[in-house]
Image: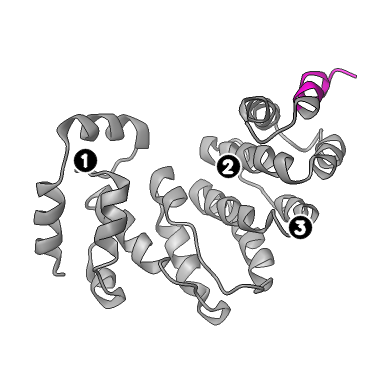
Amino acid sequence: MQYLQLLALLQGNADDSLKGLNEKLYNSAVPVIGCRIPFLRRTAKSISTEQAEQYPLHQFVEVDMIKGLVLTSKPIAFEKRGLLWDFAHSLENWAVCDTCKARFPAGEHRYLAFFGDMAAQRRQFVCRYGLVNLMSFLKEDVSAVLKETEKVTAYGSYYADMGMAWLLATAMAYNSDEVKKFMCRRRDALPDFVVRKALQKMRESFRVSEEDKRWTLTFGKE
């Protein structure tokens, strides 16, 4: 699909009320057309990698999202991880970041350190993309994921901080003992904002036990 054809398709499926909502929600400097993400996912399936690579960057959020969805539609071999590194460095809003999580071959554990190194970057959306993808490993090894997050240096950046809080809350549902030990050990290293938001997200989660939710009320008050 050529770029002008894509624009016509996106504009023909735009919702003006959603456009206004997403402009506020995405907080992006890139213009928003107003398309729903399920529609973008379906559209991305009909676009080749070669076509997506030719689409301009940062003209519309929806085009950026389609470029990311096409890139991440199939597992990316570790030898081609540079594509994900470049994509992460092109990010400028959380919506494209979170929607376009990477896929990689099952058992490819080298990606754990790779995304840890990405989370160590100072640019907040590069850091967040690393954190978002580290969450893919929580089911296998919470302790290893938490160890990688010790590389984070972008604290003080809102979207990086929220990404770390999200990861901690998600990890709590997989292995609460490891998360508790980590947060106690790293109490002085984790910003107060990250801790507060992580504890809040844990209490709001349907996947965190009532016992662990009670623990969040006492953390830091011993």
Tell me residue 103's x, y (percent). 51, 66
Depicted 166 relative to depicted 59: above or below:
above
Disc 2 crowd, CA 10 A, few/some/many (<14, 14-19, 20+):
many
Depicted 190 relative to depicted 200: above or below:
below
Q: Is residue 217 magenta?
A: yes
- The boundaries of the magenta stretch are 213-222
The residue singled out by tag 1 in the image is: 34
The residue singled out by tag 2 in the image is: 163
Mark 2 and mark 3 lie on one chain; the one further toward the N terminus is: 3
Secondary structure state at the residue bearing disc 3: loop
Mark 1 and mark 2 lie on one chain; the one further toward the N terminus is: 1
Quarter of the picture holding the N terminus: bottom left
In the picture, measured across the screen, residue 199 lies left or right of residue 156, that is right
Closer to us: 175 or 99? 175
Based on the displayed image, in which of its 4 quarters is residue 87 positioned? bottom left
Disc 2 marks a residue whose amino acid type is Gly
Res. 197 visible in picture: yes
The residue singled out by tag 3 in the image is: 141
Mark 1 vs mark 2, CA separation in Å: 25 Å
Depicted 66 relative to depicted 202: above or below:
below
Q: Nearer the viewer, mark 1 or mark 2?
A: 1
Tell me residue 18's x, y (percent). 23, 33
Closer to us: 181 or 57? 181
Question: In percent of the image, x 73 and y 46: which residue is there?
Answer: 174
In the picture, measured across the screen, residue 198 lies left or right of residue 29, that is right
Disc 1 marks a residue whose amino acid type is Gly
Secondary structure state at the residue bearing disc 2: helix
Tell me residue 113's x, y (percent). 69, 65
